[in-house]
Image: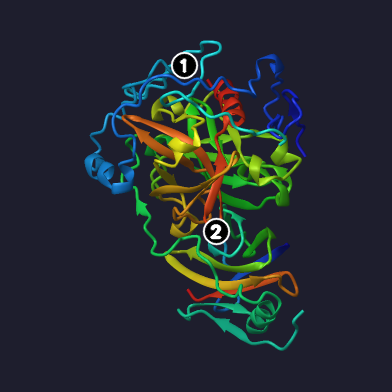
């Protein structure tokens, strides 16, 4: 079980705010709540069981998915999305 | 953390607790019914399987001509009539929300570094990527958890969810989008459903967020949200309810709660309301059930539904192969009974073994009824 500190940035490294982040695939049960990134592009995945996940990122009409695993060595997840 | 008010204590996880933010105090411990009189009456009328599953209702209501009338066969139950936007609540003491044709089961619901240098993981699409050492992280994970390297699906197989293009007909207008602001400022999207003019039922983790400061700071409730359209307005709520099993115990078995809207915003009077019922296993397993809510992978502002049979039941949980995604927490798990919509569960989580929700058993039902009365 691990809480992940996430950050969403664009292709220039600038934070992406107000993106909707949603788990669409999971190898372990997780709450089906969606997160919104804040002004610094930060988001949080609270108490995720060890496992593999797919995170869908939706912002400004773009919707892309990325796979990741838990546990993570630094409890962090930085995602870059090209806008 | 907001003050918590305990309603009553019968020693199990269903003891109701409040955010205390409404400033209201309650002392109705004598009326709590943790053991329901499961003696439902009335014959089931017609085919109770959902039409939403087949898309027929959407076709029928595409023109927005549905009256939303729920006043058909009510079998002597309390009447939540949304036919004309009005609301009736026949508060007969001892009357029960039980649905179906008798013979209800009794439920036992008591008590209840893989360091390394740089690199970048690219998804197939190439437009999104994880910055860092994702490939080595993944290799380390597979080494630690052999056989679990395949990402299992919350959207199971093909994504069969259908968008509700017109959210004005019932029951879609009684399903609400939740824009949640946690105590620590984090923001989330969830779903809820109206059971009385000012009471929205949802997942416990939408009102009490263990990893984000506890009780939510506020929740914006928008019935029938459809992108930028808010056909029934919106209300900001700060009064929340859940149960000890979730707030103190963090147990998935007790993951349910409620939002009490301000007295100035009885949104359910215009939208109509869901019924809810504690339904025996054998009947539950016969049903197609719907889940309808606001999935984040679709942006979190449009309503989507899907329906399939329930695949596994315990006294406290329902598991199903219905496609969902983050943002649908709190959605009603419901079936169609004539013009009525009867909720039997509250969607909470997704996983490889099937998506799942809190079952409305007799204890859950008692709390829903309590909260519904608060929001009359």
- The residue tagged 1 is B89
Label 1 and label 2 in one chain: yes
Report the mark closest to the observer, 1 or 2: 2
Identify the disc placed on residue B306.
Answer: none
Q: Quadrant of the N terminus of chain B?
A: top right
Q: Residue at x 52, y 56 (%)?
A: B354
Q: Is residue B284 visible?
A: yes
Secondary structure beneath label 1:
loop
Horizontal relation, residue A55 to residue B284: left or right: right
- Residue B22, image quadrant: top right
Secondary structure beneath label 2:
loop
Mark 1 and mark 2: Cα distance apart in space: 39 Å
Mark 2 Cα within 10 Å, few/some/many (few <14, many 20+)? some
- Residue B256, image quadrant: top right
Mark 1 Cα within 10 Å, few/some/many (few <14, many 20+)? some
Q: Residue at x 49, y 37 (%)?
A: B281
Identify the disc placed on residue B353.
Answer: 2
Q: Residue at x 23, y 45 (%)?
A: B59
Q: How many marks?
A: 2
Please state the chain letter of the residue tagged with numbered disc 1 in the rendered image.
Answer: B
Q: Is residue B234 visible?
A: no
Colour treatment of the image: rainbow
Q: Residue B19 appears at what percent x and percent y?
A: 70, 33
Horizontal relation, residue B144 to residue B320: left or right: right
The relative height of residue A5 versus residue B179 in the rendered view (above or below) is: below
Please state the chain letter of the residue tagged with numbered disc 2 in the rendered image.
Answer: B
Q: Residue at x 61, y 75 (%)?
A: B147
Q: Residue B138 appears at what percent x and percent y?
A: 64, 79
Horizontal relation, residue B255 to residue B50: left or right: right
Relative to the observer, which residue lies in front, B333 or A42? B333
Relative to the observer, which residue lies in front, B231 or A5? A5
């Amino acid at each position: 079980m691990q809480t992940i500190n996430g950050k969403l940035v664009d292709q220039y490294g600038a934070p992406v705010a107000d993106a909707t982040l949603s788990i669409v695939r999971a190898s372990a049960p997780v709450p089906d709540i969606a997160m919104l990134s804040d002004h610094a592009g930060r988001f949080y995945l609270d108490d995720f069981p060890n496992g593999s996940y797919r995170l869908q990122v939706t912002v400004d009409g773009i919707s892309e998915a990325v796979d990741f695993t838990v546990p993570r060595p630094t409890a962090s997840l930085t995602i870059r999305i090209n806008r | 953390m907001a003050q918590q008010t305990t309603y009553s204590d019968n020693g199990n996880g269903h003891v109701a607790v409040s955010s205390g933010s409404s400033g209201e105090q309650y002392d109705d411990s004598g009326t709590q019914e943790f053991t329901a009189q499961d003696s439902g009456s009335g014959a089931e009328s017609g085919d109770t399987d959902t039409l939403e599953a087949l898309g027929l209702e959407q076709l029928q209501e595409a023109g927005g001509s549905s009256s939303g009338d729920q006043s058909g066969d009510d079998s002597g139950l309390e009447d939540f009539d949304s036919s004309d936007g009005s609301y009736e609540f026949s508060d007969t003491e001892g009357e029960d929300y039980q649905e179906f044709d008798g013979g209800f089961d009794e439920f036992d619901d008591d008590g209840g570094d893989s360091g390394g240098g740089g690199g970048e993981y690219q998804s197939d699409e190439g437009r999104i990527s994880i910055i860092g050492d994702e490939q080595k992280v993944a290799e380390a994970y597979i080494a630690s958890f052999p056989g679990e390297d395949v990402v299992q699906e919350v959207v199971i197989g093909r994504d069969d969810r259908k968008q509700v293009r017109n959210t004005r007909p019932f029951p879609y207008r009684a399903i609400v989008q939740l824009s949640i602001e946690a105590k620590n400022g984090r923001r989330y999207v969830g779903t809820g459903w109206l059971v009385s003019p000012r009471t929205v039922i949802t997942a416990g983790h939408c009102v009490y967020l263990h990893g984000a400061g506890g009780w939510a700071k506020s929740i914006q409730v928008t019935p029938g949200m459809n992108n930028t359209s808010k056909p029934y307005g919106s209300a900001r709520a700060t009064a929340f309810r859940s149960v000890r099993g979730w707030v103190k115990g963090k147990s998935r078995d007790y993951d349910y709660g409620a939002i009490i809207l301000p007295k100035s915003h009885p949104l359910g009077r215009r939208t109509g309301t869901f019924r809810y019922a504690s339904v025996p296993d054998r009947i539950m397993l016969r049903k197609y059930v719907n889940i309808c809510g606001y999935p984040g992978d679709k942006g979190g502002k449009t309503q989507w539904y899907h329906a399939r049979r329930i695949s596994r039941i315990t006294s406290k949980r329902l598991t199903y192969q219905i496609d969902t995604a983050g943002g649908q927490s709190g959605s009603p798990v419901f079936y169609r009974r004539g013009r009525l919509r009867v909720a039997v569960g509250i969607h909470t989580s997704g996983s490889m073994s099937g998506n799942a929700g809190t079952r409305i058993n007799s204890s859950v039902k008692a709390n829903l009824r309590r909260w519904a009365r608060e929001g009359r």
